[in-house]
Amino acid sequence: MKVSDIQVQNEKETRAGFGEGIYEIGKENENVIVLTADLAGSFKLGPFIKDIPERFVQCGIAEANMIGVAAGLTIGGKIPYTTTFANFSTGRVYDQIRQSIAYSGKNVKVCASHAGLTLGEDGATHQILEDIGLMKMLPGMTVIVPCDFNQTKIATKAIASYDGPVYLRFGRPKWPNFTKEDGSDFVIGKAQQLSEGTDVTIFACGHLVWKAIEAGKALEAKGISVELINIHTIKPLDTEAIIKSIKKTKCAVTCEEHNIIGGLGDSIAQVAAKNCPIPIEYVGTNDTFGESGTPAQLLAKYGLDTPDVIAAVERVLARK
């Protein structure tokens, strides 16, 4: 199993995967309710609203109120999915999530689109790069960052039967779609191994999984054996898979569309420090806000592109 074996099926928006997933699980599970803060279009909720209008709540631009309503709905056995941009899903309502959902252990699914730099032209005020850290630090909060359309759709459906609060993070642009459509390669809390290798482990999540795949193909062409692992569940973290891999390769690179402070890289480093200290390099934003630009321009400027992953691998191999 090599990185070069991974093939793109098509390109689709990860947020469209949410739209299809929420429609299907809504039809299957009568307890599923969707709430939105005036962003039904952005979350592709049209089919859900058309066919299941009685379980759709338009909260308007009142995100804190939406979180409170969602927490209340769980008391009656409902499974509320809240929908707004990642910045407003976390930073704007952190107190409400902490007090009304996490502290109380409410079964609310906080669904966040337009995450990271690939939000693009809307700029720094909408591009949150701290949300994974904010959410993973909350006791009892599960954090899931799927990598493509198929995985977002499967994750959206899977969290309905997963008890407890969940933060589901995905993006805006069209992106390569390559995971299995039937979801047989997705289990909450279990890392997805995309390739086997012996020289270096690349851990990635979200959009950066594809950048890691592109880098892995280039590295394999140079004779470097890459073990690529998709950490779609940031919390609970699959420590067993991480330890097994780094004991074999003895070095790692982490890739995320997020600040390297508090994100996936920090989680991997903590596991390594406790169990198998190794050299680690990080691909992610470095203590900075974003800016306006196309997704491609921003990923390149902030060091989250394919060449940056390749360079990180070369650096960590030199330290091995």
Image (tube, helix red, strand yellow):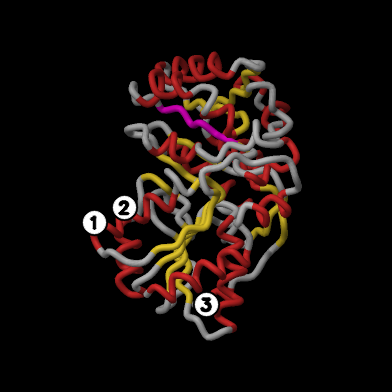
Instruction: Give the camera-side residue of 287 and 307.
Output: 287
Q: Amino acid at mark 2?
A: Gln
- Kindly identify which residue carries mark 1: 274
Q: Is residue 13 left or right of residue 217?
A: right
Near mark 1 (Cα within 10 A), the count class, few <14, some 14-19 or many ≥20, is few
Q: Mark 2 and mark 1 in contact (Cβ < 8 Å)?
A: yes
Q: Amino acid at mark 3?
A: Lys
**Magenta span main SS:** strand
In this rendering, the answer to whether 240 lies above or below 219 is: above
Q: Is residue 30 visible?
A: no
- Kindly identify which residue carries mark 2: 270
Q: Which secondary structure lies at badge 1?
A: helix
In the rendered structure, which segment of residues is drawn in magenta? 107-112
Q: Is residue 255 left or right of residue 40?
A: left
Q: Which secondary structure lies at badge 2?
A: helix
Residue 252 forms part of the magenta stretch = no
Q: Is residue 79 visible?
A: yes
Name the N-terminal-most of marks 3 and 1: 3
Near mark 2 (Cα within 10 A), the count class, few <14, some 14-19 or many ≥20, is few
Distance Cα–Cα, label 3 vs label 1: 29 Å
